[in-house]
Amino acid sequence: MTAWLPGPWVLDLVIAGLLIEWAGLWWLHRARGLGPSPADLAPGLGAGMALMLLCRLNLDGPLGPATLALLAISGVLHVLDLARRWPRPIAPFPAQAPR
């Protein structure tokens, strides 16, 4: 049985998604002041983009299962990193009841 192995277009989609994500995060931070600043995100997103572009430039055939697994792991780690960096609002102290 032949396994379905997607071609380089999957990596193209991920690269496009990363660019859209960065643009959306930039807009959220600039327009609404939400999330980490683009300067804080640039090193991580840039490193991920460089690795994906390197992988894309060196692809000659379909993506193998190991490549797909590593791409999925990378995506999960990216989401965890973004969640960790997202600033949390400072909750005011609750009003204390009079004694």
Image (cartoon, grey):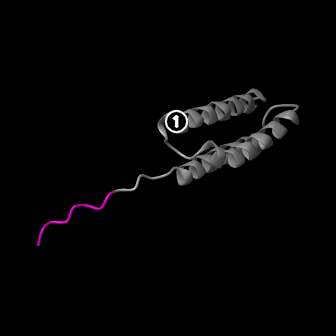
Specify the farthest residue to the left: 99
User: Is residue 40 shown to the viewer in this render?
Assistant: yes
Q: Residue at x 68, y 33 (%)?
A: 14
Query: What kind of element bears circle 1?
Result: helix
Q: Residue at x 69, y 48 (%)?
A: 44
- Closer-to-camera residue (91/54): 91
Which residue is labeled 1 in the image?
Answer: 28
* Residue type at the position of mark 1: Leu
Query: In the image, 95: left or right of 77?
Result: left
Q: Residue at x 63, y 42 (%)?
A: 38
Prevailing SS of the magenta stretch: loop
Image x and y of residue 97, in percent: 15, 66
Quadrant that contains the C terminus: bottom left
- Closer-to-camera residue (19/91): 91
Q: Residue at x 25, y 61 (%)?
A: 94
Q: Is residue 97 magenta?
A: yes
**What segment carries the magenta color?**
92-99
Q: Is residue 75 magenta?
A: no
For the image, the number of numbered tags is 1
Q: Is residue 37 above or below residue 92?
A: above
